[in-house]
Image (cartoon, helix red, strand yellow):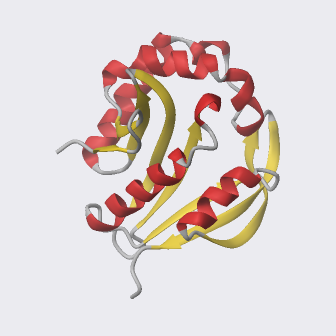
Amino acid sequence: MPFETALTDDVTLRALTEDDAEAIASAYGRNREYLTPWEPARPEAFYTQEWHKEQLRAQVLENSTGRALYTVLEADGEIVGRLNLTDIVHGAFENGHVGYWLDARFTGRGIMTRAIEALVEHARDELGLHRLQAATLPHNEASQAVLTRIGFERIGFAPGYLKIAGQWQDHVLFQLLLHAD
């Protein structure tokens, strides 16, 4: 059964499909300036439907094998964000990494909080994961507020953790334990 849940009257969280390439390219194009300080440097090709068509094939395959859950936030047929659970490891770890962004026009409405809450519930109840982790830039207070509101705890600081906006940047690390045991 495909993953899908209504977040608000106008925004739905759902698993991505290979048909989303044009809408995702458009979403990144609309939010290019807004997202640049928070994401890896992107080649020009990244903003094209063709680039995303290639990526979506691999991401849909990862969804089908359980190695990831790549999703989109959609409003009136338009992609307005991404929420991804990647690097899913089962066995003794039962862990996944959470990453996300939201269209600048939709921030401040609690949408990403609801989206991550839905993902947390799915990760716990359907995927059987024990732990989720996330990382934010130290100055990304809005993202940190979303994570702490949901119950993620700060667990550390990682110098030079990811190459964001063309530079190796420090990150604050968070985790959420999904089971008490």
Question: Where 96 falls versus 166 (above or below)?
Answer: below
Q: Position of residue 142 (x, y in %)?
A: 71, 51
Q: In this view, does 144 lie to the left or right of 85?
A: right
Q: Quadrant of residue 72?
A: top left
Question: Considering depth in this image, is 26 or 49 the residue closer to the camera?
Answer: 26
Q: In which quarter of the image is residue 159?
A: bottom right
Q: In this view, does 121 lie to the left or right of 73?
A: left
Q: Which residue is drawn at 68% across and 24% down?
A: 42
**Count of labels shown?**
0
Q: Position of residue 64 (x, y in %)?
A: 25, 42
Question: Considering depth in this image, is 13 or 162 the residue closer to the camera?
Answer: 13
Q: Residue furthest bottom?
A: 181
Classify the position of the N terminus by image quarter. Answer: top left
Q: Which residue lies furthest to the front in this view?
A: 9
Q: Which residue is drawn at 28% across and 66% down?
A: 125
Question: Where 49 falls versus 59 (above or below)?
Answer: above
Q: Position of residue 115 (x, y in %)?
A: 45, 49
Question: Where 9 falls versus 140 (above or below)?
Answer: above
Q: Which residue is drawn at 51% across and 29% down?
A: 80
Classify the position of the C terminus by image quarter. Answer: bottom left
Q: Where is residue 130 in the image (x, y as percent from the top left)?
A: 40, 73
Question: Considering depth in this image, is 172 or 115 the residue closer to the camera?
Answer: 115
